Amino acid sequence: MLQINSFVFNPFGENTYVIFDETKECVIIDPGCYTASEEDRLFGYIDQHQLKPLMVINTHGHVDHVVGNNAVKRRYGIPVAAHSDTHPDFTQAKRQAVWLGFQPVGDIDLPDVDLQDDEVIKIGESSLEVICTPGHARGSISLYAPVEGWVFTGDALFCRSVGRTDLPGGDFEELRESIRGRLFTLPNDTEVFSGHGESTTIGEEKDFNPYVAV
């Protein structure tokens, strides 16, 4: 069974997740660590618990979700995985940081591994399934843990909200279709872990999310 530890990083309050199972293999979802002290918090947890990082997985390419990629790659010598449609946002991440008011950041390397819809990512004896959920950004994905009943939605779906669609590559109707057509087909008790803010469930968002409630 998978376990989760989460961190809130950078000025945008981005949620970074470390997912691992009893084998201690782990993946890091959206490392948003922006300062040396934030990196130390993430690395300290991984090292203290003797976890074995396999890869970084980015749900999309916006700078607040990828700013820690290079530091994690250097520390553990692991690849970064994301959908191939995210590449333009990775390329623009340094410029996007300026738009969003970050202090200057360096270039963000392109992903090493391109993920596909319905791909299964193994973590020890456990797994995550890739669900393409574009609309907030090009190539946005969610990650579903069917055994545990969890889904990591990046900035597609939030508690009572959805991701903004006014940045390059955003499209509200596409996002709405991703949520209704892909995420809302999951069981109602599926717990939603978003890229910002508190967790929720699929059933709650079906009933109460004003942007996509059915």
Image (tube, rainbow, N blue to C red):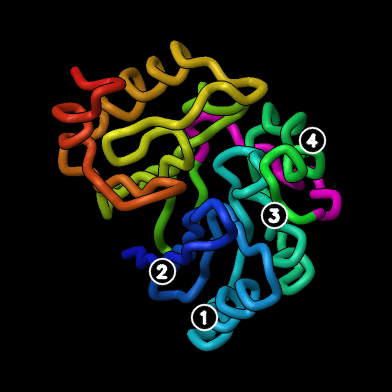
- Give the CA distance from mark 1 to mark 3: 19 Å
Mark 3 neighbour density, 10 Å: few (under 14) some (14–19) many (20 or more): many
Chain-order first, disc 1 or disc 3: 1
Query: Dot 1: what SS?
Result: helix
Work out whether residue 112 can be spotted: yes
- Give the CA distance from mark 3 to mark 2: 19 Å
Provide the residue designation for mark 4.
92
- Give the CA distance from mark 4 to mark 2: 29 Å
Chain-order first, disc 1 or disc 2: 2
Chain-order first, disc 4 or disc 1: 1
Of circles 4 and 2, the one toward us is 4
Q: Give the residue type that dot 1 points to.
A: Tyr
Mark 2 neighbour density, 10 Å: few (under 14) some (14–19) many (20 or more): few
Q: Is residue 195 above or below residue 206?
A: below
Quadrant in which the C terminus is drawn = top left
Provide the residue designation for mark 3.
67
Q: Give the residue type that dot 3 points to.
A: Val
Q: Could you say where residue 167 lies in the image, as x and y percent from the top left? A: 62, 25
Residue that appears at 52% across and 27% down: 136
Toward the viewer: 164 or 85?
A: 164
Q: Which residues are the magenta region?
A: 104-119
Q: Is residue 43 magenta?
A: no
Q: Is residue 118 magenta?
A: yes
> Magenta: predominant secondary structure element?
loop
Query: Dot 3: what SS?
Result: loop
